Amino acid sequence: MKRIILSTLFLAALPFSVLAQGFARGADISWYTEMEKDGKHFYNTAGQQTEINALMKECGMNAIRLRVWVDPVFGGQGSCPFASGWCGTDDTVQKALAAKAQGMDVLIDFHYSDFFADPSRQAIPTAWQGSTLDELAQHVADHTTAVLTALKEAGVTPKWVQLGNETRNGMLYSKYNASKKDWENAGGATGSTNANYGGGWANYAKLSNAGYDAAKAVFPDVVCMSHLDTRGSDEDLSWWFTAFKNAGGKLDMVGLSHYPMYWNNGGEATATTTGKSRNEGLMKVIVNTFKTVQVPVMIVETGVYCEYVNGGKEVMQDLFDKCRARNYIKGVFYWEPEQYNWWKPAVYNTIGWNNYNMCGFLNNGRPAAILDPWQPTDAEREQEAGISTVRPDAPTSTAYDLLGRRLAQPTHGVSIKDGRKVLR
């Protein structure tokens, strides 16, 4: 009995707005302007050259994710001497406008760096180096405001904003060491979550909140998220969000990276089995995370080995099925599906990085079956077309269990009736 009561109370705390949000089927296609400059074109399955955003829509997508770097053309001996020149504010606005023209929702991914930020590098932008913590917070606020204001003036209203990229270890805490050809701790008062490296949770929360408050000042209704990588298992991330909340951190949504076929070289059959197992592990991560923070969750990065087309499709379909079964998981984004035929940015040659091997296109520039799961369900198609999915003989209420799954005939729990929660 105690278990039932706890489950009911947990559901009762769930805002109706969380349950009512639609499901995002999207992709991060930030590379495409650089690819086009290199002469790459994109084709639909019939072989017709197609504008990339229109092609993503044809693949069933309704949202686009775009990363933005602070000053990717600065170069020099700063955070990234290999500046690419792409993914700055102007490039991001151009791509956001193209997505809007196709009726796509937009997710802006702030890296707060001049180059890629991830758990192994969170490089302080060249122009921000040597700043105090308060100055870094002001830089974060100013940059967030500038980018979002540029979007607003262009007529684009992002639906989501990511406050940093894969910030498991914090943000704004490293710099590039040219002699070592690698990134290292920057020292000083930084946004590392590790106090031993000049940071701490209070520092990180201060920087993240500076972005949160700035985003809300430009777009009060934008959904702000913290973004973490996952490691292909059922690890418990509740500790991270507990520490973040205790430090005063603000967020409206959790963003996660999930690459279910990563680090597997056992062939397609093994990779497929492993991928589906890791999807199941991810669900455990999400359940524990949702219980801790009580905000929706979104998979903002995923991908599978492009050479395993059939297995990759199976793993992605399995991921979609699992996510759709939980109403508080609000979408799935493929990371850079449009890359094909082993294209890579020119800067990768300078750094010594390999090609990305988890694209979603075939070598002829056409979408692979890997992307088939991004097609909408009948209910999603009707919802996005503004058509009611309620039949005359359908029940007038919908109820959900602890995991956000619809219940046909609930006897206990929470129902949604006439836009209100009803306890049963």
Image (tube, rainbow, N blue to C red):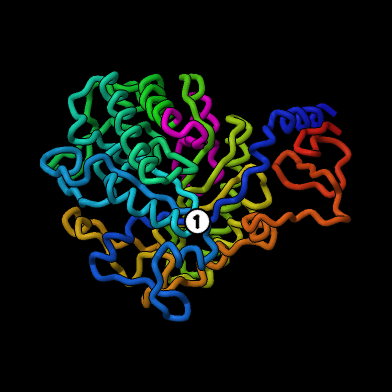
- Residue at x 65% of width, y 37% of height: 17
Residue 73 pos. (x, y %): 18, 46
How many callouts does the rendering have?
1
Q: Nearer the viewer, residue 53 or 238?
A: 53
Residue 414 position by quadrant: top right
Can residue 270 be seen here? no
For residue 272, side relative to residue 218 (left or right): right
Q: Quadrant of the N terminus?
A: top right
> In the picture provided, is 423 more to the left or to the right than 49?
right
- Residue under numbered circle 1: 103
Whether residue 67 appears in magenta in the rendering, the answer is no
- With 145 as the anchor, is 105 left or right in this view? right
Decide which of 120, 343 is in the foreground and name it.
Answer: 343
Secondary structure found at label 1: loop
Q: Is residue 163 above or below residue 356?
A: above
**Magenta residues (range):** 216-243
Residue 374 locus on image (x, y percent)? 55, 62
Q: Position of residue 419 (x, y in %)?
A: 75, 37
Front residue (pair 30, 390)? 390
Depth check: give the residue in front, 262 or 67: 67
Q: Is residue 117 above or below residue 349?
A: above
Residue located at (79% from left, 53% from top) = 390
137 to 182, vertically: above or below: above
- Asked if residue 228 is positioned above or below residue 372 in the image, the reply reads above
Is-magenta flag for residue 224?
yes
Q: Which quadrant holds residue 337?
A: bottom left
In this view, the residue farthest toward the bottom is 46
The residue under label 1 is which amino acid type?
A: Gly
